[in-house]
Amino acid sequence: MRVLVIGSGAREHALVLAASHDPAVTALGCAPGNAGTAAFAETLGVDLTLPSAIAELAVSWRADLVVIGPEVPLVGGAADAVRAAGVPCFGPGADAARIEGSKSFAKEVMASAGVPTARSEVVDNPAHLDAALARFGPTWVVKDDGLAAGKGVVVTEDVERARKHALMLLDGGHPVVLESFLDGPEASLFCLVDGRTVVPLLPAQDFKRVGDGDTGPNTGGMGAYAPLPWSPPELVDEVVSTIVRPVVDELDRRGVPFSGLLYAGLALTSEGPRVIEFNCRFGDPETQVVLPLLRTPIAGLLHATATGTLAEHPPLEWSDEAAVTVVIAADGYPGKPRTGDVITGGEDEGVLHAGTRRRDDGAVVSSGGRVLSVVGVGEDLTAAREEAYARVSRVNLTGAHYRTDIAARAAAGHLAVPAR
Ligand code: AMP
Ligand code: GLY
């Protein structure tokens, strides 16, 4: 099978790496890729904002399966274009990708499907903002209604800060979503969905804030681990039956069946799991910890998802180990990152590349905010953390920063789902 992965982050590096271990894969391509994916996959050029360019590449490269990583091409209709060109594609069409691309659409689908989530209101007129803010908080949650790469959300106990963020978004022409605050540990559950059949992967947890102890602004994700030793064994079944399955059925009923990966971002509250958000694709950095634990060959699995045959696919097999990933970010991230610095010490299968590129002189240099996603796998979270941080300590990148507490509380047994 010739597999073409679209994207250029550590998520795509993890996908390419997993596919490289699948004996059914005869050729791997990655577009646009990065310095890390280039070791396993042919690097191909493509403009991610042009669905037709992605479809043309799929045809000219003779792909048997296209796997689209990021949300931007999915929301823009890349999967529709690839399928229209006759190539199986892993990822939802633009209509179903709205579950991520529009928070108000997601809320409306959840309401129809009876899925538990935060109470919310959309504000599109600054004159209505103060009255709306008064109906929420303390602890205000203010979101950009559209795609914002994980950075459009402010969670704050300061109503002035909430107001300022909302006005900034409204000034930029973006409708704002206000939400009630959900308390409890967060979990990410990835589910493969082929329109109807739902196959959950292992649950994971990511770390959205930039600083240790969950301080500082939200980012695209600073680290993750899987599985969740503190979560009850029935969590996955409960989330599938009360959240994922009803949403998949609702989308199907509306004539926009979801095909690809439906990512439920959850708060595990004292009232049960509640949806924080849906994403229409593999999460980054959770993918970097879920895929190393998957024993089932990935290409056949994603192909079955793309072709509507998941129901016939054998049950998934998992390693009983744990995985941790620590993101190394560039100076300045999540603001404007410093780029162009040489990276050394990253030549290791556990070091996945995100914002990197190879310079003409052969040096690998930083080219984005999240630069590397360093993975450790071990018999438990403590061992996986040790391996990940040992790898991190060997990497050199001027001005880089990373969190030192990824998976620390879970490894120490300090996390629990609140009692119901
Ligand atoms: P989102 O972009 O919707 O995933 O939000 C980013 C992060 O903000 C989430 O991972 C949560 O940590 C936090 N967050 C978002 N919505 C809520 C909410 N309703 N209650 C509490 N925290 C939230
Ligand atoms: N890990 C968060 C995301 O992928 O959006």
Image (cartoon, rainbow, N blue to C red):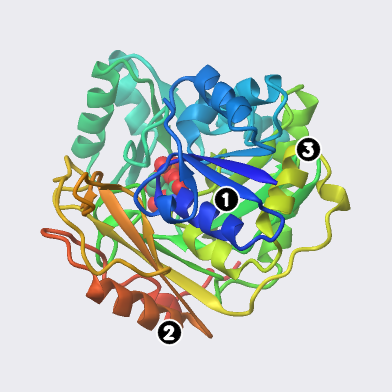
Q: Is residue 202 left or right of residue 69?
A: right
Which residue corresponds to mark 2? 382
- Secondary structure category for the residue under label 3: loop
Mark 1 is surrounded, within 10 Å at the Cα level, by few (under 14), some (14 to 19) or many (20 or more) other residues, namely many
Q: Is residue 82 left or right of residue 210?
A: right
Q: Which mark is residue 307?
A: 3
Q: Residue at x 20, y 38 (%)?
A: 161
The answer to whether residue 271 is seen in the rendering is no
Q: What is the three-letter code of the residue carrying label 2?
A: Thr
Q: Earlier in the sequence, mark 2 or mark 1?
A: 1
Point out residue 209 in the picture as x, y percentages from the top left corner.
Answer: 30, 55
Mark in the foreground, 3 or 2: 3
Determine the CA span between mark 2 and mark 1. 28 Å
Relative to 337, residue 324 above or below: below
Q: Earlier in the sequence, mark 3 or mark 2?
A: 3
Q: Is residue 102 left or right of residue 144?
A: right
Say which quarter of the image contains residue 81.
Answer: top right
Q: Give the camera-side residue of 350 and 338.
A: 350
- Secondary structure category for the residue under label 1: strand
Mark in the foreground, 3 or 1: 3
Which residue corresponds to mark 1? 274
